Image (cartoon, rainbow, N blue to C red):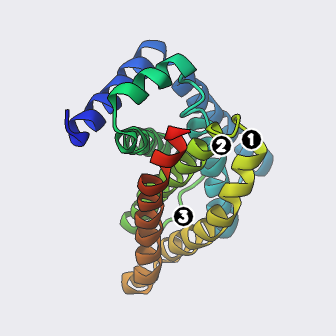
């Protein structure tokens, strides 16, 4: 079985398992909607800067809750079974793809709930949607890689926080800048650098994951 077929099979397996249980995704959706509601009850109305910052804070913690369990839900026996059959690159790539799908779904729901609860001040909806989409992919790729590393270190949550911090902070700065341009209606060419940086972060993170994970998986 080639690596692409393995990736397709693993992604399908994760989707089927999640669809059967629905506990995790429902819990995350509850977290997103309840957090938006609490923010509304606390602030009622906010300016554009706070509106943008609150949205990305919600997305950050939702992504941590959604992705940190990527490898912890797999038992050791199942991982050993995968080790005998599947290319480790197919495993990490399938996790990134699946988590990207989950994050895109959560982002759409969070953005819709946030826009309905608070008045939507976005001047360029297409650019803001692009920022949300790129942010979802970035969160998925970064936290999947870090989750894979921490899972091989005894699922150390402290290690996950330490490893993700140097990447997440610059990522959030770029995302906030890009989304702020969409809020103010700035010309789109001014956002080209931020879009290129986000794409570069994703490419670098996925490449490092494909290179590093086989050695982690072997241990």
**Circle on res. 121:** 3
201 vs 149, nearest the viewer: 149
119 vs 93, nearest the viewer: 93
The x and y percentages for residue 167 are: 62, 64
Marks 1/2 in contact by CB < 8 Å: the verdict is: yes
Q: Residue at x 53, y 58 (%)?
A: 120
Q: CA distance from mark 2 to mark 3?
A: 39 Å
The x and y percentages for residue 136 are: 47, 52
Near mark 1 (Cα within 10 A), the count class, few <14, some 14-19 or many ≥20, is some
Mark 2 element type: helix
Which quadrant of the structure image shows residue 188?
bottom left
* Horizontal arrangement in the rendering, residue 30 relative to residue 186 (left or right): right
Mark 1 element type: helix
Q: Residue at x 48, y 52 (%)?
A: 141
Q: CA distance from mark 1 to mark 3?
A: 36 Å
The x and y percentages for residue 118 are: 61, 51
**Circle on res. 150:** 2
Q: Is residue 115 visible?
A: no
Check the image and report above or below for 16 versus 181: above
Q: Residue at x 47, y 77 (%)?
A: 194
Closer to the observer: label 1 or label 3?
1
């Amino acid at each position: 079985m080639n690596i692409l077929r393995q990736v397709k099979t693993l992604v399908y397996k994760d989707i089927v398992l999640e669809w059967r249980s629905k506990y995790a995704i429902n819990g995350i959706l509850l977290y997103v909607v309840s957090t938006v509601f609490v923010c509304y009850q606390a602030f009622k109305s906010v300016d554009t800067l706070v509106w943008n910052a609150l949205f990305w804070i919600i997305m950050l913690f939702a992504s941590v809750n959604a992705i940190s369990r990527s490898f912890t839900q797999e038992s050791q026996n199942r991982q050993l079974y995968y080790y005998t059959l599947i290319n480790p690159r197919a495993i990490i790539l399938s996790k990134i793809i699946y988590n990207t799908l989950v994050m895109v779904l959560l982002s759409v729901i969070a953005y819709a709930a946030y826009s309905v609860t608070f008045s939507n001040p976005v001047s360029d909806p297409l650019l803001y949607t692009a920022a949300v989409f790129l942010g979802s992919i970035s969160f998925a790729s970064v936290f999947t890689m870090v989750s894979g590393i921490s899972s091989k270190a005894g699922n150390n949550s402290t290690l996950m926080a330490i490893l993700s911090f140097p990447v997440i902070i610059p990522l959030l700065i770029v995302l906030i800048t890009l989304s702020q341009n969409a809020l103010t209606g700035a010309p789109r060419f001014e956002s080209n650098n931020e879009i290129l940086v986000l794409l570069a972060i994703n490419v670098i993170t996925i490449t490092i994951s494909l290179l590093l994970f086989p050695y982690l998986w072997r241990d």
